[in-house]
Image (cartoon, rainbow, N blue to C red):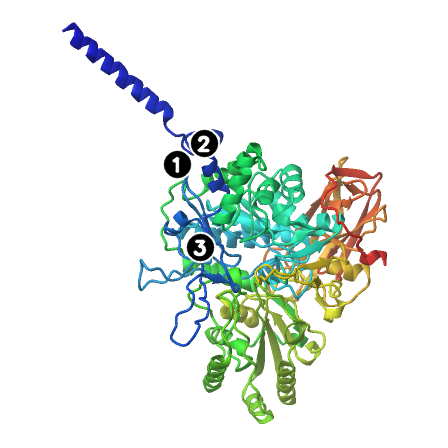
């Protein structure tokens, strides 16, 4: 009996001890334990998983068949090259959201789920069709493009659009949006300029912050990109951007800094290009010294897709996540960690930032997404924002708004094939796009149905003749405009009240635009416009041009022949309705240019060095179209981008920065310095009154002319902006602008510091950069060093800076 009792007691103690050991050995769980406890429990292999993505499943084109009837190589190809192989086990895990851009690894034993990221800047880019849901299409809203949103100059409206965008991201089960893009409009030929906001960092930074705040208010993340100086598509993954420290700080980094400090985006995407000799994702000075140390950014940094060359260098630079991830990167990072080339401290910091993003994600929080976003409501927001971003460039003798019920003749292929947005990762699978024809019809205008049928038959026929795009993200070549006889146009002019000629342009990822037949009108377009104008003016009737474009084009040589020009940009899926809203006067145009229209391309200060020069391909190295050729671009215009160049060097523009017309007029009251304190915080007020006959909004711009100090300064720099409420005739509003010493500072590379010079500053309140309405001055008694930073990102070659020549 005693022996039996002893055995029982021994067994009980053993079982208790086993349970205790099991409890102590249970893996920590993300969200229950601290992030550091979770990291401490990770194996080296698991840490590597957290910093290398799960690969990329995209629409691909098989390589050509060898001969008729033989199937092509099924190996996935992108841009004509084979994708690097992913980790085999990752390919077996089904996507949560079909057509998303990539995924972050999960580790189930630690409670870490797989997180989904998706493009794009003007709407969620996911696959419209899914195998598990035959017969259903998963559409997303195509919102206005970035340039269109910036042209509203209305951060409250852009935030509202961001809220709708965030709802859609969340409801489709995506965790992080790979947008907004906010690179600088350095040159009008930039292929992705439509995605970006402005030539000015104050506009770009505040617009990006507004949309990020809206998106992230819905519990999903945003990613600002491409960090940094990624201002062209030509050789984008191989070009060495040579730029001065000052231009980097004042022009190409300032917008990112504003957006980060005002919105705290969940993620930042490093760019493809080199900066002064070092690839951006491998550049520790950029990603750690500036971003994390100086700006105190706590979020996650990821590469652009397939960006960088050396995985170990990217991890050590502070690039926390390599996307989309592949087996070679996994092995390289693991070997680097094992050999000590990557320190445990660096790896743990990168993993920590990834885990903090995952903690915030809807997937981690087990959000029950619906797959049924409010597409109708979001389309209404898109339409409103699109109309507010349209710019009245010309309105001779009140040609616009159109008279109610007018009989409108229409010309231009884009009347029917309207461009909602650009191509590549900026494209969206939308349910519909409202053409301008349908928009005008919806607005009650009389249109020639027979002429519509003729136009559509022409377009359908021409469409069969154009070659298919080589790559999945490229737009097909544009269809040439229809040739019309003088007799046809005379007949139209006799029957119609007014003519609308739509000119369209598209561009996107992978290529920059061209001067001929793109920036400039084609010979066919010019001749057609001239013939339309001749026919209608002969009858005493007017001609309106609608510009459905993603980037700047030449206008100076033809603008005088027509009576009105409406810059509609690429307005999203409600394009036709939004354009009709403005043409009809339902919406009074209030957009203004956030980018300069030069008189000719050669007037653009970067024209001489865009997109740079190419070098020979290294012998024995096959050309990789995804990487591009070895190349270099030198930013010789330095800080003199856009209106900074025009105002300083007295170069006229076709349409200056900040320009935009209205169907009403505005008067500006007195500008006064309301206060200035001992810390040089300055507050100014100005009144704005609607002095016209219809309700409207005015964009008020605050520029500054700084005193001559140790550094040469632009003649004019934007320091703030505000948009009035919808003012009724006779109604006024007082606007307040605030600036501090940091806002006035310029970057001095000799002192590695931001410096505000002593002297007299002139504040200029204007309706554009050249239409200055009110001025006032204030004086600072001494120089102020507002911030000391690190002397980094130095160019390794001498730059022949524009203003020194």
Exactly how many numbered labels are in the figure?
Answer: 3
- According to the picture, the residue beneath numbered tag 1 turns out to be 111
Q: CA distance from mark 1 to mark 3?
A: 23 Å
- In the image, residue 588 sits, relative to residue 159, either above or below, namely below
Q: CA distance from mark 1 to mark 2?
A: 9 Å
Q: Mark 3 Cα within 10 Å, few/some/many (few <14, many 20+)?
A: many
Task: Using the image as rendered, state which of residue 635 and residue 314 is in the foreground.
Answer: 314
Does residue 721 appear in the picture of this structure?
Answer: no
Q: Which badge, 1 or 2, comes first in the chain's sequence?
A: 2
Position of the N terminus, as image quadrant, is top left
SS label for mark 3: loop
Q: CA distance from mark 2 to mark 3?
A: 28 Å
Q: Residue furthest top?
A: 2
- According to the picture, the residue beneath numbered tag 2 turns out to be 38
- According to the picture, the residue beneath numbered tag 3 turns out to be 100
Left or right of 32 on screen, residue 241: right
Q: Does the residue at mark 1 contact the one at mark 2 (Cβ under 8 Å)?
A: yes
């Amino acid at each position: 009996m005693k022996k039996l009792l002893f055995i029982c007691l021994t067994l009980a103690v053993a079982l208790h001890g086993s349970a205790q050991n099991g409890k102590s050995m249970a893996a920590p769980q993300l969200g229950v334990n601290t992030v550091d406890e979770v990291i401490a429990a990770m194996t080296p292999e698991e840490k590597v998983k957290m910093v290398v993505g799960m690969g990329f499943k995209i629409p691909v084109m098989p390589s050509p068949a060898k001969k008729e009837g033989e199937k092509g190589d099924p190996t996935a190809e992108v841009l004509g090259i084979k994708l690097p192989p992913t980790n085999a086990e990752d390919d077996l895990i089904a996507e949560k959201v079909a057509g998303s851009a990539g995924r972050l690894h999960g580790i189930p034993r630690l409670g870490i789920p797989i997180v989904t990221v998706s493009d794009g800047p003007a709407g969620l880019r996911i696959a419209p069709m899914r195998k598990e849901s035959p017969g259903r299409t998963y559409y997303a809203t195509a919102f206005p493009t970035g340039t269109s949103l910036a042209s509203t100059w209305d951060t409250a409206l852009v935030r509202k659009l961001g809220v709708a965008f965030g709802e859609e991201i969340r409801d489709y089960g995506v965790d992080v949006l790979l947008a907004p893009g906010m690179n600088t409009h350095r040159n009008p030929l930039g292929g992705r300029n439509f995605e970006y906001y402005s030539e000015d960092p104050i506009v770009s930074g505040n617009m990006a912050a507004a949309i990020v705040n809206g998106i992230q208010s819905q519990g999903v993340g945003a990613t600002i990109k491409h960090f940094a100086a990624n201002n062209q598509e030509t050789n984008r993954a191989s070009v060495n951007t040579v730029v001065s420290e000052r231009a980097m700080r004042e022009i190409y980094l300032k917008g990112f800094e504003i957006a980060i400090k005002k919105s705290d985006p969940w993620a930042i995407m490093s760019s493809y290009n080199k900066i002064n000799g070092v690839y951006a994702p491998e550049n520790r000075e950029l990603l750690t010294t500036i971003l994390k140390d100086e700006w105190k950014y706590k979020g996650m940094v990821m590469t652009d897709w397939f960006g960088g060359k050396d995985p170990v260098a990217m991890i050590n630079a502070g690039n926390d996540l390599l996307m989309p991830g592949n087996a070679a990167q996994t092995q390289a990072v693991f070997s680097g960690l094992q050999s000590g080339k990557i320190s445990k401290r660096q790896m743990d910091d990168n993993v920590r930032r990834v885990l903090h993003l995952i903690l915030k994600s809807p997937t981690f929080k087990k959000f029950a997404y619906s797959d049924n976003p409010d597409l109708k409501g979001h389309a209404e927001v898109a339409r409103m924002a699109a109309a507010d971003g349209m710019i009245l460039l010309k309105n001779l003798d009140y040609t616009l708004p159109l008279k109610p019920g007018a009989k409108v003749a229409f010309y231009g292929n884009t009347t029917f094939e309207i461009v909602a947005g650009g191509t590549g990762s900026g494209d969206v699978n939308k349910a519909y796009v409202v053409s301008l024809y349908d928009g005008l019809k919806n607005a009650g205008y009389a249109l020639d149905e027979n002429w519509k049928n003729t136009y559509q038959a022409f377009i359908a026929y021409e469409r069969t003749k154009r070659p298919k795009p080589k790559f999945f993200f490229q737009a097909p070549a544009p269809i040439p405009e229809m040739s019309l006889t003088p007799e046809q146009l005379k007949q139209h002019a006799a029957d119609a009240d007014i003519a609308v000629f739509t000119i369209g342009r598209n561009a996107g990822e992978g290529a920059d635009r061209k001067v001929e037949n793109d920036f400039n009108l084609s010979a066919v377009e010019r001749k057609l416009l001239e013939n339309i104008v001749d026919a209608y003016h002969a009858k005493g009737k007017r001609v309106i041009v609608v510009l459905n474009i993603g980037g700047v084009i030449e206008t100076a040589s033809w603008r005088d022949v027509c009576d009105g020009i409406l810059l509609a940009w690429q307005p999203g899926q409600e394009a036709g309705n939004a354009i009709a809203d403005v043409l009809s006067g339902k919406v009074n145009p209030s957009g203004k240019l956030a980018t300069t229209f030069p008189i000719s391309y050669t007037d653009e200060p970067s024209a001489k060095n865009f997109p740079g020069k190419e070098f020979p391909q290294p012998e024995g190295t096959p050309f990789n179209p995804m990487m591009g050729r070895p190349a270099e671009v030198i930013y010789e215009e330095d800080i003199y981008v856009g209106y900074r160049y025009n105002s300083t060097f007295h170069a006229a523009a076709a349409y200056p920065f900040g320009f935009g017309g209205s169907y009403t007029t505005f008067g500006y009251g007195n500008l006064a310095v309301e206060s200035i304190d001992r810390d040089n915080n300055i507050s100014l007020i100005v009144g704005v009154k609607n002095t016209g006959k219809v309700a409207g909004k005015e964009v008020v711009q605050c520029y500054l002319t700084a005193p001559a100090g140790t550094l040469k300064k632009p003649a004019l720099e934007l320091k703030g902006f505000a948009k009035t409420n919808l003012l009724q005739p006779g109604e006024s509003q007082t606007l307040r602008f605030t600036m501090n010493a940091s806002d006035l500072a310029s970057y001095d590379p000799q002192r590695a510091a931001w410096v505000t010079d002593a002297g007299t500053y002139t504040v200029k309140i204007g309706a554009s950069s050249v239409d200055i309405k009110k001025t006032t001055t204030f004086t600072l008694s001494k120089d102020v060093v507002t911030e000391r930073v690190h002397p980094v990102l130095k160019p390794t070659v001498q730059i022949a800076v524009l203003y020194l020549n």
